[in-house]
Image (cartoon, rainbow, N blue to C red):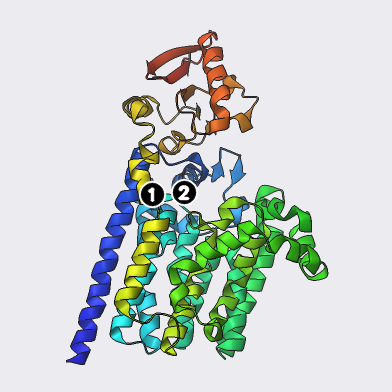
Amino acid sequence: MKKNNNNDNYYLVWIITVITIIILFICASVRHFLFQSNALDLGWFDQAVYLISQGQNPIVSFSDDHILGDHAAFIFYPLALFYIIYPSVYWLFAIQAIALSLGSIPTYKLAKKAGLEENLCLTMVGVYLLYPLIFNLNLFDFHSEVLALPALLWAILAAKNNNFWRFLTTVILILSCKAVLSLTIIGMGIWLLIFEKKRFYGSIALGLGVCWFLIATQVIIPQFSGDEVAAVGRYSFLGDSVGEIIKNLFLNPGIILSRVFTLANLEYLVLLFIPVFWGLSPKYLTPLVAAIPQLGLNLLTDYQPQKDLIHQYSLPIFPFLLLAVISSLAANQGLIRRPKIIIIWSLISFLALAKYSYFGTKYLTQLDTFSAMKEVVNLIPKSGKVLTSPQIAPHLTHRPIVKLAIKDAEPINISDFDYILVNRRHPSWPNSQETVINLVNKLEQNQDFSSIYQKDDVFLFKKVLDANLTS
């Protein structure tokens, strides 16, 4: 009877997971449909995957960078197989929703592996799915590292079960998602090696993490971008290259301490830990050793998106935070052990920190131009080179050339484009309002362009000199 009950609970976990997938997919799709997604990052990755699916070089036209020069994320090549079936940005929303939700399955299995009672195992599934980062990250365009979230949990479970091939496969998958995740794999390797006494698996993770970090940062990214890793600039106080930063991390600890102990970091740590504080115990925090590399990166930078539960930067920390809670509960530690109270607190944390309210506020701010934007994007053929606003760009990235009408792109040479589409009322980026206004004024006086659409401050101009273009 107990075995049947366990099977029923496992089916329940799958049902909850599938429901979550549907909810997350709908939320991300509605946000995009309302023109609230952005060129950076959804348009960036959508264009790269589309170009790969078409057999073209994945040069992201916003910056003319090869996708591998961004984060050495080879995972975009297999993702392009979906676009071969049918090219649609909604594949990315589906993949992201599935990945974020599927982490509930290994969470349940890890809780059972730790010996938690069945009701607490189910509770941990709720804790995972209600952690605000899951919902918020799903709304923040698309990021390849979401695939690493369930993979990290599966890798840990594989190491605990001595399943070599599953462990190796998941680690390789994680490394293919983003170069910086190699640091998390290194941290996981140290944790497995020293604290879990999994020397074989720890050594594999440590070796693969170090090797991929060196290959990605010193060979692949410089080869495809012609420059250092993009995020190096966020740590310029430590040096101008990855090598200098690593050296100064060890030689100048005083600089590090002065950057860590700040009010912003304190607020970030509160946000990070408050949803699960009830299940943490000082004696069972060793899984967080694996999270130290990413946590350190987030604490050292002044870049605000790395200090919240909205962006992707806290994602590699979350699996090990869950493990710390599971370890504490398994040892009968933690402030709260009653499932109902745990779920209530998780729900309170979700209601306080998840950005579901955006659907009634922020995501409705462009409804006054929604009809015009839906009409106008269908007027531009895929053969044209387009200049457009950031919120419109993800609807037009299935073409080789799309540039952004933003202040950072000035001076803008309008002769480079066949079509120019802007939303003067909602330029997307606040600092680009004047840029868009000036651009519209300039186009209205330029005889080389004709206005072929104008409604609700949404303007579409077409170059008239090229006889091969059609509207």
Query: Which one is nearer the viewer's eye here, 327 or 244?
Result: 327
Q: Is residue 101 visible?
A: no
Q: Is residue 368 visible?
A: yes
The residue sitting at the left extreme is 1
Please provide percent x and percent y for residue 168.
51, 77
Please provide percent x and percent y for residue 384.
47, 27
* Residue under the image location 57 percent in, 57 percent down: 307
Query: Which one is nearer the viewer's eye here, 234 or 269?
Result: 269
Identify the amino acid type marked 1.
Tyr
Mark 1: give few (<14), some (14-19) or many (20+) Cα within 10 Å. Answer: many
Tell me the residue that label 1 is attached to.
83
Please provide percent x and percent y for residue 392.
43, 33
* Residue under the image location 57 percent in, 17 percent down: 438
Looking at the image, is 106 positioned above or below residue 1?
above
* Helix, strand or loop status at disc 2: helix
* Residue under the image location 35 percent in, 74 percent down: 342
Query: Which one is nearer the viewer's eye here, 408 or 261?
Result: 261
Please provide percent x and percent y for residue 110.
40, 82
Q: Quadrant of the N terminus?
A: bottom left
Looking at the image, do the residues carrying marks 1 and 2 touch, with CB atoms under 8 Å apart? yes
The residue sitting at the right extreme is 251
* Helix, strand or loop status at disc 1: helix
Question: Residue 215's image quarter?
Answer: bottom right
Q: Is residue 278 left or right of residue 175?
A: left
Kindly report the distance in space between the C-alpha atoms of the residues bearing marks 1 and 2. Answer: 7 Å
Q: Which disc is residue 398 wearing?
A: none
Identify the amino acid type marked 2.
Val
Tell me the residue that label 2 is attached to.
49
